[in-house]
Amino acid sequence: MSGKLYVVGTPIGNLEDMTYRAVRILSEVDFICAEDTRVTLKLLNHFDIKKPLVSCHEHSHEDVFTRAADRIAAGENCAMVTDAGMPCISDPGAVLIGICYERGIPVESVPGPTAVATAAALCGLDATRFAFEGFLSVAKKQRYAHLTALARDPHTLIFYEAPHKLKQTLADMLDIFGDRRISLCHELTKIHESVQRTTLSQAAAYYENVTPKGEYVLVVEGFVQDDDTAEYTIEDAVAYAKQLAENGMRPTDSAKEAARLTGFKKSEIYSLMK
């Protein structure tokens, strides 16, 4: 009889956010798969838990995940954790989950904090419907393509961002989105937690003179369509698709995205792009 994989949420900053159930599961499993064993070891030491750790991160070979699944299939119970928050949210844990599902191994969630949901609750913008976009690429071409594809998305947009990339990200968002409202959620649940509610232009200007420190979750207002321009023409659709393609998106994907936004057929847009 196989064991079970537990997908365990861990605190995003404040260790008091650890749940009783999460502590119990980590204490009972046979081994723990962790994104960074050094980070997880600090967590385990805080709760006086001593368990073998297996390093499973984005650069791990698939054999690492396969061997972990082999152990679970043989009867051991495993907990999977990330450095902070829920595994698989901007984290490579989905690889192990996928292998377990393919092999009929039970997978159970032990939910905990997530930065995206916490930011959505705190941001002060309408986050009834939001799109979580994770981290933007460090490569300018891919980053521009990603942001351009979102330029007309009406959902509130949520991104994770590291401090050393924040200034460039704000500048790129202002360039592509125009001046919109933004909430910069900083160091969530930690001692210096703050929410800076401002606009993209004001945020970009502010961080020209202030060095960002700590982790950020950016919550950006979605695209608001003017009533006067609510109807798209095929020319609008083609122009938008071409803009996406120029910023690095594949032409077929550009046509698909333009079709989703405007309602015209992908094939019609694609044929007119040439």
Image (cartoon, rainbow, N blue to C red):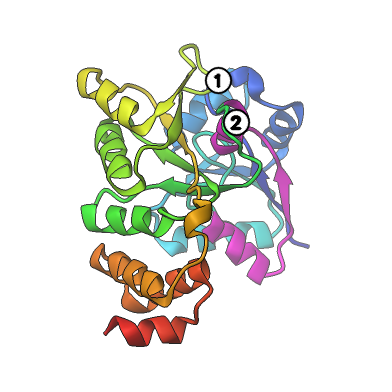
Residue 16 image position (x, y, % from top left) = 64, 18
Say whether residue 5 is left or right of residue 258: right
Give the residue displayed 43% in from the left and 39% down from the top.
160
Is tag 2's residue or tag 1's residue first in the polypeptide sequence?
2
Q: Is residue 201 above or below residue 93?
A: above
Give the residue displayed 59% in from the left and 65% down from the top.
99
Element on which disc 2 rests = helix
Residue, far top: 191
Name the quadrant of the N terminus.
bottom right
The residues tagged by marks 2 and 1 sit, at their Cα atoms, a distance apart of 9 Å
Residue 252 image position (x, y, % from top left) = 37, 79
Numbered label attached to residue 189: 1
Residue 23 image position (x, y, % from top left) = 70, 29
Residue in the foreground of this view, choosing between 131 and 117: 131
Give the residue displayed 38% in from the left and 69% down from the top.
236
Q: Local crowd at mark 1 within 10 Å, few (<14), some, or many (≥20)? A: some
Please state which amino acid type lies under the numbered disc 2: Thr
Q: Is residue 76 above or below residue 98?
A: above
Please state which amino acid type lies under the numbered disc 1: Thr
Residue in the foreground of this view, choosing between 272 and 107: 272
Say whether residue 204 is left or right of residue 43: left
Residue in the foreground of this view, choosing between 233 and 180: 233
Report whether residue 59 is seen.
no
Q: Is residue 131 above or below residue 229?
A: above
Q: Which residue is mark 2?
A: 118
The answer to whether mark 2 and mark 1 are in CB contact below 8 A is yes
Depth check, mark 2 against mark 1: the one in front is 2
Which range is magenta?
94-122
Q: Is residue 109 magenta?
A: yes
Name the quadrant of the C terminus.
bottom left
Q: Is residue 65 magenta?
A: no
